[in-house]
Image (cartoon, rainbow, N blue to C red):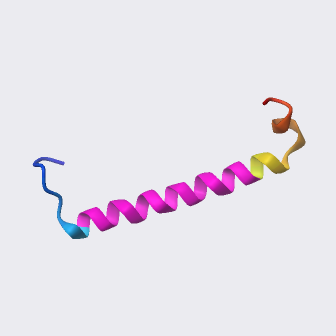
Amino acid sequence: MSGGRVPDSERLLMESIRALEEEQLEVEEVDDDSRPSSSGDS
């Protein structure tokens, strides 16, 4: 990304992608917590 200003459409796209990634991370964390093996690591 060159330049300091980002088009609204591109910014919204990046925000939506970031939101989806965060949701996937939350789902993965929940799956890890459900596993007894991962709970012993922490």
In the displayed structure, does residue 1 sit left or right of residue 23? left
Q: Main secondary structure of the magenta part?
A: helix
Q: Residue at x 86, y 32 (%)?
A: 40
Q: What is the x, y in percent for residue 20?
A: 50, 62
Residue positioned 24% across, 70% down in the render: 9
The answer to whether 8 is drawn above or below residue 22 in the figure is below
User: Number of marks in the image?
Assistant: 0
Range drawn in magenta = 10-30
41 to 15, vertically: above or below:
above
Question: Is 18 positioned to the left or the right of 39 in the image?
Answer: left
Q: Position of residue 42 (x, y in %)?
A: 78, 30
Q: Residue at x 21, y 68 (%)?
A: 8
**Outermost residue to the right:** 36
12 versus 2 height, above or below: below
- Residue 16 in magenta? yes
- Residue lying furthest top in this view? 41
Q: Position of residue 25 (x, y in %)?
A: 60, 51
Outermost residue to the bottom: 9
Question: Which residue extends farthest left?
Answer: 3
Residue 3 located left or right of residue 24: left
**20 left or right, relative to 15:** right
Image coordinates for residue 21, horizontal then vertical, percent: 51, 56
Identified at 17% across, 58% down, the residue is 6
Q: Is residue 32 magenta?
A: no
